[in-house]
Image: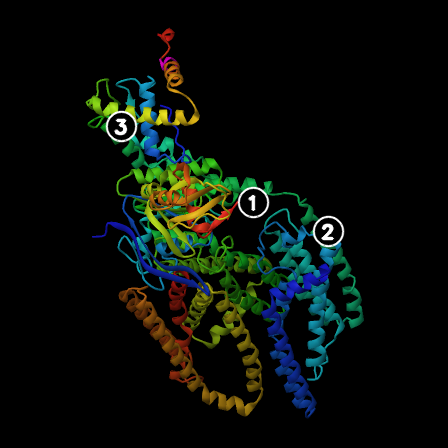
Amino acid sequence: MRSYAAALAWEFWRRHRWGLAILVIYLAALLVFAAVMGTTDPSPARMALLASVVGTAAIPLVAAYMLVLVVFSFGSQADLASRESIYPGRMLTLPVRTAALTFWPMFYGTVAAASLWLIVARFVFWPCGMELPLVWPALLAASFLAWTQVVMWMPYPLPLLRAFAAVVLLGVLLVTPQLAIQLAVPDGVIAAVLAPSLPLAYVAACVAVGRARRGDVPDWRWLLALPRRIAESRTRRKADFTSPARAQVWFEWRRHGRSLPFIVGILLPFALLLLFIADSDMPDVVLNTLAGVCFLPPFMAGFAATTVSKANPYVRDYYGVPPFTGTRPLTSAGLVAAKLEMAAWSTLAAWLLVLIATPLALTLSGQWPVITNAVQSWLAVESPLRVAVITVLIGLGLVAFTWKQLVQNLYVGLTGREWFVKLTVFVGLAILALVLPIGKWVYDHEQVRASFRDLLPWLAGIAVGLKASAVVWIVRGLRRRRLLRDRTLVTIGTCWLICFVCLLGLLLWLVPARLAPWYLLALGAALILPLARPAAAPLALAWNRHR
Amino acid sequence: MQIHITTSDGVPPYLQIVNQVKYLVASGRLAAGEELPPIRVLALRLRVNPNTVARAYRELETAGVVEKRSTTGTYVSYAGSPLARREKLRIVIERIDALLAEARQLGFDAHEIHDLVRQRDAAMKPPESEK
Amino acid sequence: MSESVVDIQGVTRRFGPKTALDDVSLTVPRGVVFGLVGANGAGKTTLIKHVLGLLRAETGSVRVFGRDPVADPVGVLSRIGYLSEENDLPGWMRVDELIRYTRAFYPDWDDTYAEELRQTFALDPAARVKNLSKGQRARAGLLIALAYRPSLLLLDEPSSGLDPIVRRDILAAIIRTIADEGRTVLFSSHLLEEVERVADHVTMIDQGKIALSAPLDAIKESHRCLTLRFAESRPQPPVVPGVLVWEGAGQEWTAVCRDGPARLEEAANQWGAQIVAERVPSLDEIFVARVGIPASAVAEE
């Protein structure tokens, strides 16, 4: 390999060959599908159907774009909260000029991002009848990647500034296309506005990498020293932990517990902003915003969940259980119980933020009348008892759903096997890529929808059967490894049954019989309540801890 | 009490302690009735296993150089040890034989050895002027 | 009657194609300092991880205090103090938080002793672990491993990469532990000088197999380093059973032999050679002789 450019390209390929290979296969599948379907029977109705199907099939493309983002900004094992640049230190000591060090990753990245869009738009969307613009989205994708690289490679004077900058950048990316479409700006103008951002990004990146290389970053941490000293002097003499379980819950809280409240806290102002912008004659906007705010914690919990089970990045074996945790005299079940409890506290903290911020925002923006009107119109239809119960149920349900999101996929990260984690992600995305288009197709066809509704109980029954057999297998594994005492297993089973009965009762009372028969409600309740996956967590941890 | 342990010359550490204590007693730096450090303290100071120190103390006790007083500690015994004179003679004769063999190999004769012995004896005596 | 603290029988462990441990059996009695010695990658850390239950025994059995560390992690780990060579203390914790967190797990935690250790090691309670130097981190790890006076102190290459002052602290910790009744120390190291000073029993591991396992005194007594001077110059030294390695050139050849010098003295008489020097080799030399080069001549150029 003669040149730095070739070496870098080889390194990108070699390091992420599996991800890139899957991406190529996926693109090829889309291309073939579009080519075959697009050329047969170009009637308008069919074209519309095809467009919607392909549209949903392309949702995993977002994941593909994120993969490209991560690969080309060297972010695969990056610490977003650190001050130092993400640019790999070992490359900074190569005998290559800073301009070249910056140019090649940016070049490969922008080309990859732009070509991703160009290929998909031209060869998948266009044959299926969606004539989307080519140039400016490609430029937007490339520009966003370039600026992400700048944000990642810049060393910052304060920790967490990078996360803040990334959020701002993400905001700009999401707002720009919407504004452009709303204001009906011609494509050429958008392209002309976006084009200079690329060279600008290159210059900024050169500055960033240059600073990282020379190590001249101002250190503003003294700003934080005073608040920290105040906080530390307050907590002079802490009481001792009453039991190992308490200590472990504290440990988990300090490590992971604050991520969800933190993320929710950062995004909440942006979400509530709409309340201030909406006029008083747009009640829908207010209600939609509130709904969005209510779904924010569960949605973010899905992201925060990936950190709850991650291991210590300082230790060689990134995914394994670090010896510090593995040698605690605590059973694997105890370790998992601490994580579950921490998740509960985390959920409560996040929801507390929502419960404090939302009324505050409503009061400040003077949007209370909208809420009172909506509630009154609802009270006119339903009895006050049902309204109250439904409201409380929805509230509790959202909180429980958030907790469920946090702990549901614990078992994946806890296995500690990198291949397992990546396999799960891949399977999830594959299911998404298949299920969404099929779902859309079913939804659009009347007869299919009717027969699907008839089939639904059977499908639900099969799903419950699968869940039950998974639970049996897991319980056998737990008993064989003696991870949980039989008494504990019986207690957990009883609690689950009680929850199931209560939930079923409530659903039967609230949901009118014509919407869904009782057996469907029962199957649904059985599917919703988490059992198999949280129970698999101790098994996964033991598999990881005792290799 | 200045003792130095090396692991490089092949002599077992316990034997090094025994020999050095004997030397210190003989040269007067450890007076009769003086207390030796407890096993644990000496082990920490020398950075050796306490069992090694315990073994050295046992050897010294057998040789009559020190005596153990129930729980109070280990003390240098007064002159006139219970060990038979015959045993002491045996130890010293062994040393002399080794010395003579080495000296002969290196080319010294008995006269020169004799003179050297006198010289070293004079150097080892505690200086009278310090009293 | 389990007088032995650690009892490993017939453990084999493979990682893919590589065999890390090959039918290893080891018994650590109570109240000794047990030294585990071996080259990098020989299997010492793998063995220690089996004792901790971090690795499951694929074949054979591992019993610590008579229990299986995988089946009963609480019973075993609450009596073991572990210091690893890896830097795995959580970086975000402060020293006082680390102490407060760890003591919740051990009912035998001694507060005054922990405070005494903290002052001896000069650890600032408000300092975060990630801001401590490597030596300070080793001391912090040592503190939380010692403060509850564990029955078994397990050290995995504790001194690697540390300055002499910290190494002295670690040796002192080993000695203090063993001075108490009934407590045992098992440590692996390549600093053979230190092993020689404090170990009662030494086990040498080479490529997953146990090359030698004996009390240190027995090892030192049975190995000898003899220099022979031959009548005429030889290109190769004679082959004598019991000699681990030869070194030298021409007329003078030095051998490290096991099982006593008797056989070599016979061979010397046979070949008309004279024994010019005899000494006890250091543990370092014995280790290199046993594990380094196979028993063949090494000619000096």
Give the chain of mark 3.
B
Q: Amino acid at mark 2?
A: Val
The quadrant holding residue A173 is bottom right
CB under 8 Å between callouts 3 and 1?
no
Mark 2 belongs to chain: A
SS at badge 3: helix
The boundaries of the magenta stretch are B121-125
Label 1 lies in what chain? C
Task: Name the residue tied to disc 2.
Answer: A207
Q: x%, y% of residue A349? A: 47, 57
Residue at disc 1, secondary structure: loop
Q: Do we see residue A380 in this rendering?
A: yes
Amino acid found under the numbered disc labelled 1? Glu
Q: Is residue B124 magenta?
A: yes
Within-10-Å neighbours for mark 1: few <14, some 14–19, many 20+: few
Q: Which residue is mark 3?
A: B60
Comparing marks 1 and 2, which lies closer to the viewer? Answer: 1
The disc placed on residue C277 is none
Q: Position of residue A486 (x, y in %)?
A: 27, 67
Q: Is C270 colored magenta in this rendering?
A: no
Q: CA distance from mark 3 to mark 1?
A: 48 Å
Tell me if A455 is positioned left or right of B11 in this view: right
Kindly identify which residue carries mark 1: C301
- What is the chief secondary structure element of the magenta stretch? helix
Cα distance in 3D space between marks 2 and 3 = 75 Å
Relative to A442, residue A330 above or below: above
**Mark 2 residue crowding within 10 angstroms, few (<14) / some (14–19) / many (20+):** some
